[in-house]
Image (cartoon, rainbow, N blue to C red):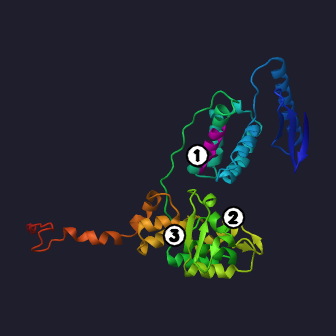
């Protein structure tokens, strides 16, 4: 066995009793802590070789294998963010050490800075990895159970036109362009930040999102209106591949400090980048766009997600609202005899 340093972090390299070569992060910048973990693993290897039993796999080993097997997963980058945060709590543990108490600890710590929904996503990721370790890798025999926290129903937060104008006035140029494009197309953040010139046909006034880039796994045609085309023209010549850039560099994340500071200056609270998509959909419904058309424009797989905007317009119901009108001589209408209230 040996320990070595990589980018300020200590790593451990050793050969497991079954001959598997293991290389993992010690999860620490302190050499003494790395050495303690090294000695613990060495003692475990000796015990297995001389006494026998099942190899105690570490959380780090499971993370490395999980990432290797989940390259197809669209949310893998989100998983990596959660896993980096989890390393401070699970980095030195074996899978057998992770029990209900550990789940509770992780959840309590996450709730200090995040919502119930985010805490549930983190604990669900732990459970998914443990289930893979049990059912597929046969590294452990049991997985602890836990109860998920209650989550609020899906929210719909959108801006009025005047609020959108206030926000645009506070944004730096590159974010201003991306927000205007989002409000014109309804595309998700990653589809805007990663949009390439090869995905745009200005003559046909359209763009497209490839199936592997779409949340629903289905290619999305994106018609470009005048506002969207204006934004696209402003980006010509700034980069050979990407449409939206910052000082010549590609942009991978729009939810930055500049975005949050602009929201504060505009006096807009409780608003996320994804709410720009809600705003786009809400404006469409208020302008009379049918829900089935909005579904296609937004790339939703079914009407369930679109129905949350239905209450913002009653135009599609107006033709039926008069069916109960009391019209004299109309046999199809409902007739009520009007009775005047008695005077007390």
Q: Is residue 143 visible?
A: yes
Mark positioned earlier in the residue sequence (3 or 1): 1
Residue 46: in magenta span: no
Residue pictured at 71% horizontal, 42% vertical? 66
Q: Which residue is mark 3?
A: 279
Whether residues under marks 2 and 3 lie with C-beta atoms below 8 angstroms apart, the answer is: no
Name the residue located 31 percent from the left edge and 69 percent from the top edge. 317
The residue lying at 75 percent from left, 28 percent from top is 56
Query: SS of the residue at dot 2?
Result: loop
Region rendered in magenta: 118-129
Using the image, tell me which numbered label, if any, was put on residue 109: none
Q: Can residue 158 be seen in this snapshot? A: no
Q: Which residue is mark 2?
A: 253
- Give how far across and how far down residue 34 sits, in percent: 86, 38
Q: Main secondary structure of the magenta part?
A: helix
| Mark 1–mark 2 distance (CA, rounded to whole Å) | 23 Å
CA neighbours of label 1 inside 10 A, class few (<14), some (14 to 19), many (20+): some
Q: Against 19, is 82 above or below?
A: below
Q: Which mark, residue 120?
A: 1
The reply, left or right, for residue 228 in relation to residue 340 is right
Q: Position of residue 185 (x, y in %)?
A: 56, 72
Q: Between tags 3 and 1, which lies in front?
A: 3
């Amino acid at each position: 066995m040996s320990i070595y340093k990589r980018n300020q972090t200590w790593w451990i390299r050793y050969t497991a009793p079954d001959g598997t070569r293991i290389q993992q992060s010690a999860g620490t910048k302190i050499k003494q802590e790395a050495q303690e973990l090294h000695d613990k693993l060495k003692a475990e290897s000796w015990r297995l070789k001389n006494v026998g039993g099942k190899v105690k796999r570490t959380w780090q080993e499971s993370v490395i294998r999980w990432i290797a097997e989940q390259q197809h997963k669209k949310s893998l980058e989100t998983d990596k963010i959660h896993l980096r945060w989890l390393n401070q709590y699970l980095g030195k543990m074996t899978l057998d050490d992770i029990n209900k108490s550990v789940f509770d600890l992780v959840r309590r710590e996450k709730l200090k800075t995040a919502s119930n929904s985010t805490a549930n996503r983190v604990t669900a990721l732990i459970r998914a990895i443990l289930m893979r370790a049990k059912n597929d890798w046969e590294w452990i025999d049991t997985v602890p159970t836990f109860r998920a926290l209650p989550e609020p129903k899906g929210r719909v937060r959108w801006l009025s036109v005047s609020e959108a104008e206030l926000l645009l006035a506070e944004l730096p140029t590159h974010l201003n362009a991306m927000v205007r494009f989002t409000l014109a197309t309804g595309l998700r953040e990653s589809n805007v930040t990663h949009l390439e010139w090869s995905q745009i046909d200005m003559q046909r006034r359209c763009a497209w999102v490839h199936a592997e880039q779409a949340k629903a796994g289905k290619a999305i045609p994106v018609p470009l209106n005048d506002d969207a085309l204006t934004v696209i023209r402003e980006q010509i010549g700034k980069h050979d591949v990407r449409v939206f850039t910052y000082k010549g560099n590609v942009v991978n994340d729009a939810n930055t400090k500049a975005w949050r500071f602009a929201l504060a200056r505009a006096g807009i609270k409780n608003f996320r980048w994804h709410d720009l998509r809600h705003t786009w959909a809400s404006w469409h419904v208020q302008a009379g766009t049918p829900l089935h058309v909005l579904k296609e424009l937004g790339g939703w797989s079914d009407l369930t997600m679109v129905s949350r905007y239905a209450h913002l317009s009653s135009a599609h119901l107006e033709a039926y609202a008069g069916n109960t009108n009391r019209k004299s001589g109309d046999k199809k209408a409902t007739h009520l005899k009007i009775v005047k209230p008695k005077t007390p």
